Amino acid sequence: MMGGMWMQPVDKAHTLKMPWSRGWRLVCAAVLMVVVSSRASAAEPPLRVGMELAYPPFEMTDAQGKPAGVSVRIAKALGEHLSRPVVIENIAFDGLIPALKTRKIDCIISSMTATPERARSIAFSDPYLKTGLAILAAAKTKVDSIDDLNQPGRTIAVKKGTTAHQFAAREIRRGRVLVLDRETAAVMEVVQQKADAFLYDPLSIYQHHQRHPDTTRALLTPFREESWAVGLRRGDDTLLQDVNAFLRAYRAAGGFERLGEEFFSEEKAYFEERGIPFLF
């Protein structure tokens, strides 16, 4: 008692508990949930996309050495659709499927044709691009069809691991098949008249002919139709469904049409004028 007034003793335990009211606990719980959610989003694993950056304008590097091109744009759009960061892994084309099967990458977006042979080893998404095999012929060689190449004395250049390589190994019985590691090397065999023809997709054949108009001829109508798809591991059904959903949404939103106009406006017009099927 002091000066006639009675002072109530302070309950320290009660004072310390006062801030932990029910409302305060709810606020703290909400903050904790936000922090946990943010950490979970930040920890989302990257989507590792395999491609060979040696096939412009689909897979290539820009002036700074960074991945660029059509397939890179598709990969990044897929990453946004999945809310996952994207890491591009530059892998030689014939090493892509082994890398996928050993889990070094999550998927392949590398202008890969969905073939029955490959489908026995990996899974494929729905097709996202139609293409085929065409012929870049040496200017002085009398070649008008694939049958003209399946003859004694003919030399057909192909890039290792491609569907053209598979086709030639299976179908070209009388001609000589020259297998090379690089596309440019195969083209130069034709330019220098060392090979009668190079087999590849129509768009690439068109572009190579434009670079070498005096020494090559382009037979652009595909003698074999093909389609490109995203390669995935067998059993990865959730990612397969997500990729197919992305491809449908991307096409519906005009994504592929915009890529065609941005990267291939000249080629698209050239093909359409001649009634040759174009990619997208």
Image (cartoon, helix red, strand yellow):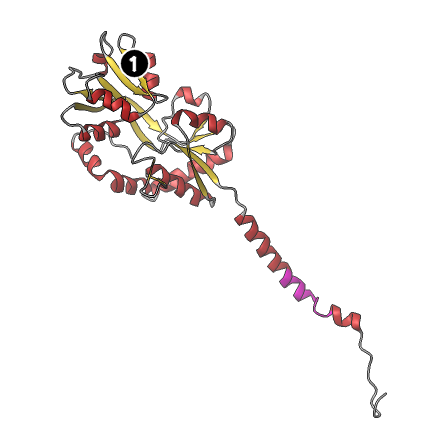
Label 1 Cα crowd, 10 Å radius (few <14 / some 14-19 / many 20+): some
Of residues 13 and 155, the one nearer the viewer is 155
| Location of residue 54 (image quadrant) | top left
Q: Considering the image in quadrants, where does the N terminus appear? A: bottom right
The magenta segment: 18-28
Of residues 165 and 67, the one nearer the viewer is 67
Res. 132 in view: no
Residue found farthest to the right: 1
Residue found farthest to the bottom: 3
Residue type at mark 1: give it.
Val
Mark 1, secondary structure of its residue: strand
225 in the magenta segment: no
The x and y percentages for residue 112 are 37, 28
Q: Considering the image in quadrants, where does the C terminus appear? A: top left
25 in the magenta segment: yes
Residue at coordinates 59% horizontally, 52% vertically from top-left?
Answer: 36
Res. 86 in view: yes
The x and y percentages for residue 23 are 66, 66
| Location of residue 97 (image quadrant) | top left
Q: Report the label total.
A: 1
Q: Main secondary structure of the magenta part?
A: helix
Q: Which residue is mark 1?
A: 177
Q: Is residue 73 above or below residue 225?
A: below
Judge from the rendering whether residue 125 lies leftward or rightward of residue 25; answer left or right: left
Residue at coordinates 27% horizontally, 7% vertically from top-left?
Answer: 174
| Location of residue 205 (image quadrant) | top left
The x and y percentages for residue 24 are 66, 66
Q: Is residue 267 above or below residue 253?
A: above
The x and y percentages for residue 79 are 44, 42
